[in-house]
Amino acid sequence: MKWINHLLIIAASMTSTLAMAESTLATGEDWVAKIHSETTHISTSELLDHLTSHPDTEFLDVRLMEEIASQGGLIDAGRRTHHVPRGWIEHRIGDEIPNLDTPIVVYCSTNRRSPLAAYTLQKMGYTNVQNYSDGFLTWRDEGLNIEPTDAAVGTQLFRTPTKVSENVYSAIGATAPATYENSGHNNNLSFVIGKEAVLVVNAGDNYLLASALHTEIKKVTDLPVKYVVLENAQGHAMLGMNYWQEQGAEVIAHVDAAESIAARGEGILERMIARNRDKSMGTVLSQPDTTFDEKLELSLGGIVVEILYLGPAHSPGDVSVWMPVEKIVIAGDIAFHERLLPVFEYTDTLGWIETWSNFAALDPKIVIPGHGHATSLEEVDNWTMGYLKHMRKAIGNLLDEGGSLIDAYKIDQSAYSHLDTFDELAGLNADRIYRAMEFE
């Protein structure tokens, strides 16, 4: 009995201690109130005025990903919006925003976590931090710009197809990296409708995404999908091809793309499955049915389509789909304008510049790029050739002066910093172009 009494005394003591602790413990609201005077707060009207004079402001969203998806997306203003959940601020902010003097506006849904995050940033040494006190829900409800993480809720597609011309549609993908939330739809999935058949450009990142696109095509036409063209061998272009082959479509790719799929396809599939998890269901690696070298002409009934290999560019086997009568080109990854172009270890930047003359010679009225909305030749020339020539000139000068790889990372790319994926790609691009040009 003595030991029982002893345990009861210990339990009573612990209960008393906990009660004392609870009576002195501040609530979250108490803590926010305590630090309020130590952080700078900005309302919606003040924020809009601030952005006019400080367009280089970067936003930090500290909500959970589930909230971002359910509430409609991210604030689309300033230079860029970063997403780092409140619990990961201390560990990840240095990678997201390395410059301590960057102007930062922090927000959450309703001003409960953002003051804490802003306070933390200040304690970590960030010098120009403001808390958006109205919160995301106010921004959204006032009809201000939002960047959705999924613009077509209820389908695997990031966006459903929009009409580009009388016979051409395109489901414009996210210009962000592929994620579970966008289901790997971060490129454009386009289709051309003839009088007898439909041609699809890009099989999609996975089986379910291909099926979702097909569902949308059936809303526009009863004609069968006869051809599926792979713009290259990247996962978001080719992994969904087994769906289309099950529907009886003929999958077409350049010989170089087919070789790349055979060599690298299993690894690409494994990475997609790891990212997409349940959304990868049904996807198995397949191979194109038909390959070609330079040009393949197809008739859809009343519309002639040319599949063109114009030369080395972004990746092995890059092709463009050209409609000579309509003067529309579904360019694929030879042309960029809303996101920074990526340079991979296999990208031939010099060849890309030389190939561009063949692309420009088409003189299209409408360009549907691999990523981003339909636009003009002038626009993609500015942000594709302009960037490649800028980087090659800067790195060429660097090499002539004996500069190192570390110096390549310091090249001024600020003219392109507004483009999506700039933060993810700018440094890597400099690295890869430098390494390639060392041996040209």
Image: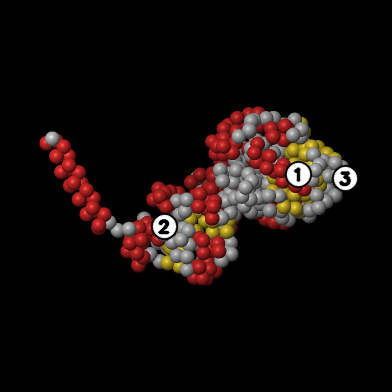
| Apparent side of residue 29 relative to residue 401 in the rendered image (left or right) | left
Q: How packed is label 3: few (under 14 Cα within 10 Å), some, or many (20 or more)? A: few
User: Is the C-beta separation of discs 1 and 2 under 8 Å?
Assistant: no
Q: Nearer the viewer, mark 1 or mark 2?
A: 1
**Residue at point 54%, 59% (across, down):** 75
Percent position of residue 325, x then y: 85, 49
Q: Position of residue 258 (x, y in %)?
A: 70, 32
Query: Badge 1 is on which residue?
Result: 218
Dot 1, crowdedness within 10 Å: few (<14), some or many (≥20)?
few
Per the image, label 3 sits on a secondary structure element best described as: loop
Which residue is found at the position 49% from the left and 70% from the top? 46
For label 2, the residue is 113
Q: Quadrant of the N terminus?
A: top left
Q: Is 83 left, or right, of 253 in this rendering?
A: left
User: Which numbered dot is residue 302?
Assistant: 3
Sequence-wise, which precedes: disc 3 or disc 2?
2
Left or right for 27, reference 141? left
Type of amino acid at the residue the image marks with label 2: Arg
User: Along the horizontal axis of the image, is 435 left or right of 128?
Assistant: right
Disc 3 marks a residue whose amino acid type is Gly
Q: Nearer the viewer, residue 279 or 338?
A: 279
Q: Amino acid at mark 1?
A: Lys
- Crowd tier of the residue under label 2, counting other residues whose Cα lies within 10 Å: few below 14, some 14–19, many 20 or above: many
Tell me residue 304's x, y (percent).
85, 43
